[in-house]
Amino acid sequence: MLAVITLVLYWPIGDPWQWGFIPGARTVPVTLTKPVTHTTTYNTDAFTGGIQYWLQQQQESRGGQPWYYYFMVIPLYEQVAVVFGAAALVSYFLQKRTLFATVSGAAFLVCTGLTLFTGGMPGLQKLAALLMIVSGAALFVSRPRSLLVNLVLWWTVTTWGLYTFAGEKMPWLTLHILLPTMVLAALYIGHLFHSAPRLSKKWLITAGLLAITALISFRSSVALAYVDGANPTEMLVYTQTAQDVPAVNKVIQRIPLQTITTGAQERVWVDNNDTWPWAWYLHGEPYSIGTSEADASTAAQQRYPVMFLSQENHDAMARDGKLAAFATYTGYEFKLRWWFPEEGYRAWETTGVKGFLAQAAQPSSWGSLFNWWATRTPFAQADFTSWANVYPFYVYVRTDLVKPYVTKYVGHGWDAAHQRAVQAASGVAPAPLQNDVAAALTRPVVPILTINGATLARPLGTLRDMAVDAAGNIYVADAGAQRVVKFDRAGRYVTAWGALGTGPGQFSNLYAGVDPAGIVVGPNGDLYVSDWTRIQEFTPAGAFVRQFGAGNQGKAVTASSFYGPRQIAVAPNGNLYIADTGNKRIQVYSPTGTHLFNIGTGAQVAAQLTAPGSFDEPSGVAVDKKGIVYVADYWNRRVQRFTLNGAYLSAYPVAGWVAQDYQEPYLAVDNKGHLFATDAPAINQHVNHVLELDATTGATIRALGSGAVGTAGALTQPSGVAVGPDGALYIADPGAVKLLKIAP
């Protein structure tokens, strides 16, 4: 019969019948992370596999509840089952029985007690649990005239013992304990009614007690299911979404879709940590999801109307000084989830069984339980003011949308939430940033022109490189929207071109926020822009002229193939020097797109990457008026110098650069022999700078950018740099969504 049942269950889903019938026929290796990371093999057959999996999962101890959790919670909700089930246990165990039944019953009770109270000795507890099952089985077969009663007794006591012994204690597991308890209670209620004449004293007492306990249990059921479904006052609700969530959703749904820097129509960006319950509330509309601090910063640069940030990423950004990315947003803190404050009863376990019994006997403990049962007032009321029982989330609304859509509909109703967000941002102490440049050489940034990219009709996104032509027009590569944006010399918007794609005039988005990566003004005034697999040439008005190069990612490398080219520089002879970053070399092309030669060995073997003339993540390149080529050899943390023909000259270190980091530096050189290099790594962070170096020796002349992000004179995240025809320095600061001009 067992084999037939197994075949019926397994055959329709295509699994071999042995997996469900033969113990150990199917095993799967699984990596667990608690209490330490380890690999175990689960037996996944239908019978022994389930038991083995359950036993191995107990070390996870989800819920972290004390051993007496079920003995406290179940009586507070299920009075019928507990009162009549306990009476049945006492009555049936006290009935006259054989010696074998008495011994097995006594052993059963003793082993059950040991299972409950030997949590500090795992070996003894496991042995007691095994003996509890064996003695329970012996008790079951000891009275063949009462098989049903014995079965339910064994089932009830064993279930209470095993689930108390189990490491995982959750509200929903009470159902497994209640099922045999309710059956036992029902048997005993039936016995009481059938053993007494109708309307006799015994019959009436039974009926009255049943009615009272049923009414009390019904009251708890109504409170649990209908009254407090969204309130953290019910012990049987593990955690629930707070009322703040639908209230916030109601407000943000009034905000119309907005055009972000990518050109898409968007309303909400959601932190992946808090996808639920927003996946439900936003199921009728498109929304974007991010997973990291970098994703959140990019979304802010792309000007999403509303952003939901998890507590983890919010606190991390606060510690890292990255909340400046939300300078153009207004923040609010709300409750996402909350739960019953458990500290009031968890503390009873801290002093062992003896201490627990002493604590349980205290009138204050019983008073707390009765007060909760009568008024649904949790023990630790202070948690509601300190938010100790709350998992918050942060809502950032673009400041330009607050007045017409938030204030208009909720007035000052969100003021307290805003103050909480401000306090949270300032209350998480930022990690102190070290200045990798001597204080005497550090200078604050004092721009003579600032272009705020966040205020454009289509705001700027992830700024990369920038260029300035002979007339002072400013061009910036906006990798957040796959476009080039042009401003006049006064910082006024002129035009923009580009879109997502691989066709002429389009740019790749294979990796978010990367392309277009480099831009330079050629000898005839045209713009050369680097894309992931090619270089494109445009007129100053944005008309496509030509493209050259082909990608080799995942393919054989050729002399002229590209793998993620970054910065481009123009030599005095008009040739283009291109940082072919992924291929670890500099490629040289004519202005019309003819490949001439390469600089660097192109070595890919780690042992060869540090040799003179070899590169590891070469991202920036510049050429001075004398024809000296400078290469930002980023992961080798140095600048290398070459002749126009590629002959190696020298190198000098840049202490603040970081290997394996992708916040890559850009270079620019002026006519005074000064080299400008961005210094703002995403890992091993320090005070962000644009370094001004002696181009020949590498000696630091000054470092622009002082103090922590968000303070006066600081740079948020400098990337592209350029020197204008008047000698002024231009800096792209994507973290602040600004372009800055610094006097020479």
Image (cartoon, rainbow, N blue to C red):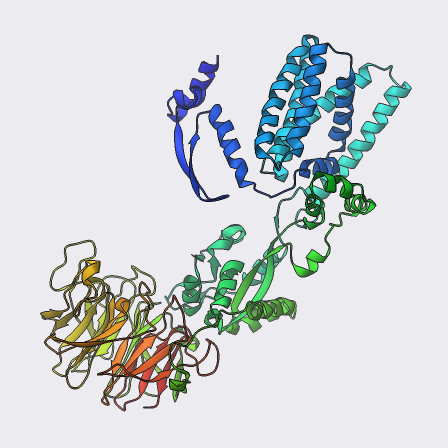
User: Residue at 24% of width from left, 90% of height from top?
Assistant: 672
Quadrant (top left, top right, bottom left, bottom right) of the C terminus: bottom left
Q: Residue 241: x percent and y percent?
A: 60, 51
User: Residue at 78% of width from left, 17% of height from top?
Assistant: 94
Q: Nearer the viewer, residue 169 or 504?
A: 169
Spot the residue most to the right: 201
Is any part of residue 333 visible from this angle?
A: yes
Query: Against 646, is 62 above or below?
Result: above
Q: Residue 622: x percent and y percent?
A: 21, 78
Q: Residue 279: x percent and y percent?
A: 50, 51
Q: Quadrant of residue 499?
A: bottom left
User: Residue at 61% of width from left, 29% of height from top?
Assistant: 162
Q: Nearer the viewer, residue 120 or 297?
A: 120
User: Residue at 75% of width from left, 36% of height from top?
Assistant: 218
Q: Number of marks in the image?
A: 0
Q: Is residue 563 left or right of residue 38?
A: left
Q: Nearer the viewer, residue 538 or 612?
A: 612
Query: Against 556, is 507 above or below?
Result: below
Is any part of residue 491 visible from this angle?
A: no
Q: Residue 227: x percent and y percent?
A: 71, 46
Q: Is residue 229 left or right of residue 468?
A: right
